[in-house]
Amino acid sequence: MMTAERPFKRALDRLNSAGLRPTRQRLGLARMLFEGCDRHVTAEQLHGEALAADLPVSLATVYNTLNQFTAAGLMREVVVEAGKSYFDTNTSDHHHFFVESTGRLEDIPADRLTVQSLPAAPAGTRVARVDVIVRLVEDEV
């Protein structure tokens, strides 16, 4: 006999594996972020989606949760400019295209971009990773 998977199981498993307590709000946000395909969201976008899905949550809670997910390694923060961050559910090694006029962020697979030369890291430090954001403008028609 086949047993059905519990609702929220994937999101719950991700929270548990990261050592995060699955509160109702955390679980609801995790489900929105991790149940589908990889995505890039701002806190404001996720807050709007949560309210539309009848998940009562404050914008501050959304920010706190995204920062907790990032600190736990479930997401990456991509800062495209001062005061403008996206949270990326794809934590693999990759880079991004950023369309300045629309704010759209798109993945560039790591093997599609080569960084050939980096300066030596300052004494007492090492390079953890290199994040490249290729900024795009749309052609005028």
Image (spheres, rainbow, N blue to C red):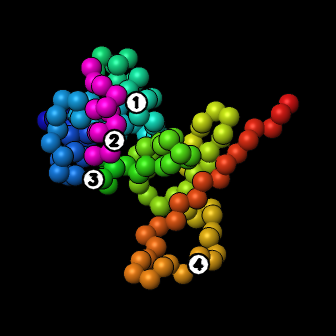
Mark 4 vs 1, N-terminal side = 1
| In-image side of 116 versus 41 (left or right) | right
Q: Quadrant of residue 92?
A: bottom left
Amino acid on which the number 3 mark rests in the picture? Ala
Please identify, in this view, whether the residue under mark 4 or under mark 1 is nearer the observer.
4
Q: Is residue 85 rendered magenta in the image? A: no
Q: Is residue 60 above or below residue 133?
A: above
Real-space CA distance between mark 3 and mark 2, rounded to the nearest whole angstrom: 10 Å
Please identify, in this view, whether the residue under mark 4 or under mark 3 is nearer the observer.
4
Label pair 2/1, CB-CB below 8 angstroms: yes
For the residue labelled by badge 4, is the local secondary structure a helix, a strand or a loop? loop
Amino acid on which the number 2 mark rests in the picture? Leu
Q: Residues within 10 Å of mark 2 (few under 14, many from 20)?
A: many
| In-image side of 86 versus 34 (left or right) | right
For the residue labelled by badge 2, is the local secondary structure a helix, a strand or a loop? helix
Q: Which residue is mark 2?
A: 66
Quadrant the C terminus occupies: top right
Q: Which residue is mark 1?
A: 46
Amino acid on which the number 1 mark rests in the picture? Leu
Which residue corresponds to the image point at 65% horizontal and 41% vertical from the top-left?
99
Numbered mark located on residue 72 in the image: 3
